[in-house]
Structures are given as structure tokens and as C-alpha cells.
Image: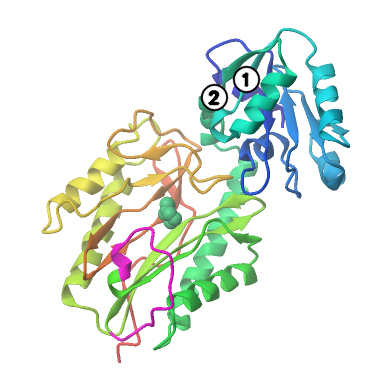
């Protein structure tokens, strides 16, 4: 993955001699390790990747994952036995006074202190932004995996109407949706599945409970599939039986807001514009002010992959970015509606990576 290593150096403001990525233990793994190495399997807890300006990359791997490290493209692998052995190998690779970039965003404080101690002559720089920028624009290999993750989550979304049963709990629905994703090829979920019934659906990050589904309730399901380490992220809103008339109208407004946002997406557009388009539409309705989060975010190795779209976003959209478009309206006591899709930004517009129908499903209303 020489190009990926080089991109981080190209994005850095200062000329750097090396970039050191160090993971802690699950869940404190630095996804940049997987970005640079593209290792197909393994956690690589406590492991280190060192990149150089010519694109070369050395990985200090634990014996648990050496075989996976060896199949990674363009990587020199050294297996360490103890932390002291790892430090000795690192000092040998970076022996003198060098300008070293560390990914502060995903480095634990403990590992920061450890690296400072092991590399006493290094000048340390934060490469959070260069890493974020490199990862924001996906290469062909990443787009293929994101496309597949989008297909899996879409198939699971299409199955939801057949899963809904009177009296089932939010936890049961979450488990069944996740099982569907696994059946369709997911290695797991890309984040904790959100399922909210009735008034719970008005809370955007609701964690499912043992609340039971009843006729007339709205439902929000927000979930994502992991495929070869890449994430998808999709939300669909449903009604079980006849929903309150207001909720139906809310759904129509959210659909329109999503279309308004999609209409302005293309390379070169300021990243806040799609958010502003959706917010303008919602704020022109009786639900003014009830779209209470950003329109979306970059998706990749992490479900929230660094770049986000909200009124404060300063970066422009670029071809090759993969972003979510997820407007919502949340009415306390009544319920909420969110529609979320993943799209690939192109020169001329966008391409959907998630394809499940977006119209309001009234399930079991007969
Ligand atoms: N799953 C949280 C989100 O959609 O960003
Ligand atoms: Mn989501
Ligand atoms: Mn999202």
C-alpha cells in the first residue's frame, strides 16, 4: 500500500522522516494501521507500523498475526517477542534524530508516553489531519469493499418488513437484523445497532431495550455491515400498522430533505452545503429546528471516518469520498424519522452504495 503511505507524507505540512502508527488493545486499535498495511486478518494489538516517505512500510507484528502480516502487500514484517524486543527493533529502525509523525487521534496516552521514551531524539508531530485527509478519499480497492458492505446492509434492510412481529422487543429486532447481515456476508456489525420503537425513535442514538412492538408505533433502525474491515451505515424508518398522521408527514419531509441534500452533492461543493440544503427544507416545515445533528459523515474503515458534514464543515467534497446522507426529524413523545444512505461522491454528482427502498413502509396495517 505504498500509495497510501505516500499520501500521508504528501498531506503533512512539515517534511517528516517517518510516520509511526501504534495500536493499543481492542477496541483501541488505530484503523490507520489497517489503512496502511491492508492486512486481511488479525487485531495487531500493541503492534506498530512505520512508514517512510518513499512509501515503504515496516510492521512490528506479534507472533499471533505474523502470517497475516506477511500476506499484506509491500510490507516488511518483523516479529517481536516482548515489548522490550519491539522497542529495540524500533530504535534500530529509527536510530537518530528524526521528525516522526504520530496519529494523535487514535494513539492512547500510554502509548504516546511509551514512544516518546523509546525515541528520545525524535521530534514528534501530530499527523491526525494528514491521515484523515488521506483516508477521506477512497481508492478503487476501498470503494469495492464499501460497495459490498452497502449491498449487504441494503439486503438486510429489505428484509426488515418480514421480521416485524407484534410483541417483539427492540433487542430482538436488533439481533435479527444483525443475523441477516451475517447471513448476507458481513463479518459483523460496523457499530452498535440502533432500534427504537415509538417515542424511543425520537432519540437519534437510542440503544435497544426490551420494549415491545405494538400496532401504530414508528420504528427507526440504524445499522451497518462490516465487510473486509470496511463499514456501511444505513437507516430506515418504518411504521407497524397505521402510524399517527403526523409521523407519515414527517417521513415525507425527511425524504424531501434527503433529496435536497443529494441534489447538491458533487465534487468541489463545500461540505456544509448538503447539510444546509436539508436543514433549509426541514426548517421550512412545522418541524423547524428538529433536525438536531449533522447531515452525515465519511464512512470507511471506521463508521465515522473523520470527515463530517454540518454547518461548520470547511472542507470541500472530493470525488472518491464515501459519505452518509442522513437527515432526520425527531418529535419528542411522538417519534422520529431518519433516512440514511451511503453515497460515493463523483465529479458529476454521486452514486448510491445503499439501495434499499426509502419510502415509508407501513407494515402489517391490514
Ligand atoms: N449510526 C450513527 C450514525 O448514523 O452516524
Ligand atoms: Mn447510521
Ligand atoms: Mn451515519
Region in magenta: 200-215
Label whose residue precedes the other's in the sequence (1 or 2): 1
Instruction: Identify the mark at residue 130; answer none if there is no mark.
Output: 2
Residue 204 drawn in magenta: yes
**Quick check: 141 left or right of 105?**
right
> Do the CB atoms of the residues marked 1 and 2 lie less than 8 Å apart?
yes
Residue 135: quarter of image: top right
Residue 243: horizontal and vertical position, in percent? 24, 79
What main secondary structure does the magenta stretch of the protein show? Answer: loop
- Name which residue lies at 67% across and 52% down: 228
* Quadrant assignment for the C terminus: bottom left
Q: Residue furthest top?
A: 97
Residue 101 disc label: 1
290, 55: nearer the viewer: 290
Tag 2, which secondary structure? helix
Give the side of residue 35 with respect to residue 332, left or right: right
Crowd class of label 1 (few under 14; some 14 to 19; many from 20; radius 10 Å):
many
Where 249 sits versus 225, above or below? below
315 is higher (above) or lower (below) than 359:
above
Residue at (79, 39) in percent of width and height: 72
The x, y position of residue 329, in whole percent, is: 24, 59
- Above or below, comparing residue 168 to residue 276 in the picture: below
Q: Residue 247 vs residue 141: left or right?
A: left
Q: Is residue 214 magenta?
A: yes
Q: Quadrant of the N terminus?
A: top right
As helix, strand or loop, the secondary structure at mark 1 comes to strand
Report x, y in % for residue 179.
59, 73
Which residue is at the front of the view, 166 or 112?
112
Q: Residue at x 21, y 71 (%)?
A: 334
Amino acid at each position: 500500500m505504498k500509495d497510501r503511505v505516500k499520501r500521508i507524507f504528501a498531506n503533512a505540512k512539515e517534511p517528516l522522516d517517518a510516520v509511526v502508527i501504534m495500536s493499543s488493545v481492542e477496541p483501541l486499535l488505530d484503523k490507520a494501521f489497517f489503512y496502511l498495511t491492508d492486512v486481511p486478518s488479525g487485531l495487531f494489538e500493541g503492534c506498530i507500523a512505520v512508514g517512510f516517505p518513499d512509501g515503504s512500510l515496516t510492521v512490528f507484528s506479534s507472533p499471533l498475526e505474523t502470517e497475516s502480516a506477511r500476506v499484506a502487500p509491500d510490507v516488511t514484517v518483523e516479529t517481536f517477542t516482548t515489548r522490550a524486543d519491539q522497542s529495540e527493533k524500533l530504535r534500530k529502525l529509527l536510530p537518530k534524530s528524526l521528525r516522526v509523525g504520530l496519529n494523535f487521534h487514535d494513539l492512547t496516552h500510554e502509548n504516546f508516553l511509551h514512544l516518546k521514551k523509546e525515541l528520545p531524539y525524535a521530534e514528534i508531530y501530530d499527523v491526525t489531519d494528514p491521515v484523515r485527509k488521506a483516508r477521506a478519499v477512497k481508492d478503487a480497492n476501498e470503494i469495492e469493499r464499501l460497495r459490498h458492505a452497502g449491498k449487504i446492509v441494503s439486503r438486510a434492510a429489505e428484509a426488515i418488513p418480514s421480521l416485524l412481529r407484534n410483541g417483539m422487543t427492540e433487542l430482538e429486532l436488533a439481533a435479527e437484523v444483525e443475523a441477516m447481515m451475517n447471513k448476507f456476508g458481513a463479518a459483523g456489525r460496523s457499530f452498535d445497532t440502533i432500534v427504537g420503537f415509538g417515542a424511543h425513535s425520537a432519540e437519534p442514538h437510542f440503544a435497544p431495550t426490551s420494549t415491545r412492538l405494538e400496532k401504530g408505533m414508528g420504528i427507526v433502525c440504524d445499522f451497518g455491515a462490516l465487510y473486509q474491515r470496511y463499514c456501511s451505515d444505513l437507516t430506515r424508518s418504518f411504521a407497524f400498522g397505521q402510524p399517527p398522521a403526523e409521523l407519515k408527514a414527517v417521513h415525507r419531509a425527511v425524504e424531501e430533505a434527503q433529496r435536497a441534500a443529494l441534489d447538491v452533492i458533487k465534487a468541489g461543493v463545500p461540505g456544509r452545503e448538503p447539510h444546509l440544503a436539508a436543514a433549509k427544507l426541514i426548517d421550512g416545515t412545522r418541524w423547524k429546528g428538529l433536525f438536531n445533528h449533522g447531515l452525515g459523515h465519511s464512512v470507511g474503515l471506521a463508521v465515522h471516518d473523520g470527515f463530517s458534514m454540518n454547518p461548520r464543515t470547511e472542507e470541500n467534497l472530493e470525488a472518491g469520498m464515501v459519505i452518509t446522507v442522513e437527515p432526520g426529524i425527531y418529535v419528542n413523545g411522538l417519534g422520529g424519522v431518519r433516512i440514511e444512505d451511503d453515497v460515493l461522491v463523483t465529479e458529476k454528482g454521486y452514486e448510491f452504495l445503499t439501495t434499499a427502498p426509502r419510502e415509508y413502509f407501513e407494515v402489517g396495517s391490514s
